[in-house]
Image (cartoon, rainbow, N blue to C red):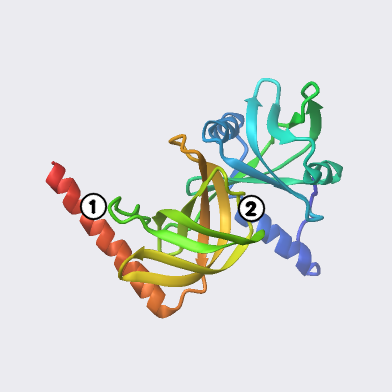
């Protein structure tokens, strides 16, 4: 854990660091009960957690168990994954996960690997964090497409150029889109940028965009696949107007459907 010196007029860098720390105080959580509650939600939602190091190593896993009484939490892992050892060899690591519109971030300390018999399955044990940060992601209205016209996003898999994907759109906002990846398709890792994506929401709403994968998680309805949340980038003015019109119209149609069912 690093401790910053008090800021002085002759030390502008320390002053900037102190200001940054003060800004983070609004998002810092130190209560043991609240920390345990948020971590338990990661377990219940089977949210993907990315453990990253300053050297660039990155391992994606799930929180398997949280034991507040023992001050321990455990991640699932596969000891045959080459990225795992790089994370274990690093001195520092940070974990990032998402609970819907909430970003959870905390330092990973005391990370050790615990083998489970002769299989490749293993757990990663670490100390329950003394603090974590809870960030509210940018809010924007999201709509789920109507079932009679399922929209799709088409692109080449960023890791397998010969694999052309046509993924179902789960929901969309003016700044982001969630896609469904079937279980037989390799998951696109968080942080990946995907270029030349063709999005077709309905007959009148088609545009091209760049996607940046923000997070991935298991489907809560037990569908055989994953949900990936992506940020929409490089939209031109026409595409933005078209997307906003689609969101407005879908919202209105859902209101009318709700009135008809009342």
Q: Is residue 68 visible?
A: yes
Q: Residue at x 79, y 54 (%)?
A: 54
Q: Is residue 145 left or right of residue 139?
A: left
Residue at the image position 46 percent from the left and 58 percent from the top? 177
Would residue 142 appear left or right of 253 to someone viewing this image? right
User: How far from the left and from the top, in percent, is residue 219?
Assistant: 48, 40
Q: Position of residue 186 (x, y in %)?
A: 62, 49
Gap between marks 1 and 2, in whole Å? 33 Å
> Is residue 158 among what the camera can see?
no
Percent across and percent down for residue 204 are 30, 70
Label 2, on which residue?
Answer: 189
10 Å neighbourhood of mark 2: few (<14), some, or many (≥20)? some
The answer to which of marks 1 and 2 sits earlier in the sequence is: 2
What residue is pinned by disc 1?
254
Whether label 1 touches label 2, CB < 8 Å: no
Query: How busy is the neighbourhood of tag 1: few (under 14 within 10 Å), some, or many (20 plus)?
Result: some
Helix, strand or loop at label 2? It is: loop
């Amino acid at each position: 854990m690093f401790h910053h010196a008090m800021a002085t007029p002759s030390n502008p860098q320390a002053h900037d660091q102190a200001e940054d720390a003060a800004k983070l105080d609004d998002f810092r959580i130190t209560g043991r009960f609240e920390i345990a509650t948020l971590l338990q939600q990661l377990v219940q939602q089977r949210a993907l957690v990315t453990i990253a190091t300053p050297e660039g190593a990155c391992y994606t896993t799930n929180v398997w168990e949280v034991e507040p009484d023992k001050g321990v939490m455990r991640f699932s892992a596969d000891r045959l994954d080459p990225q795992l050892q790089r994370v274990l060899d690093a001195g520092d690591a940070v974990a990032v996960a998402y609970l819907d519109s909430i970003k959870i971030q905390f330092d990973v300390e005391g990370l050790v690997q615990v083998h489970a018999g002769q299989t490749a399955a293993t757990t990663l044990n670490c100390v329950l964090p003394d603090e974590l940060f809870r960030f509210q992601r940018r809010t924007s209205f999201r709509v789920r497409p109507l079932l009679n016209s399922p929209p799709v996003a088409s692109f080449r898999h960023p890791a397998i150029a010969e694999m052309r994907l046509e993924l179902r759109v789960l929901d969309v906002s003016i700044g982001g889109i969630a896609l469904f990846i079937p279980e037989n398709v390799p998951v696109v890792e968080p942080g990946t940028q995907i270029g030349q994506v063709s999005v077709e929401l309905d007959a009148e709403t088609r545009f091209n965009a760049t996607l940046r994968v923000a997070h991935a998680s298991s489907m809560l309805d037990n569908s055989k696949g994953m949900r990936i949340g992506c940020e929409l980038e490089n939209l031109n003015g026409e595409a933005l107007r078209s997307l906003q019109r689609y969101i407005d119209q879908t919202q209105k149609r859902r209101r009318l459907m709700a009135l008809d069912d009342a």
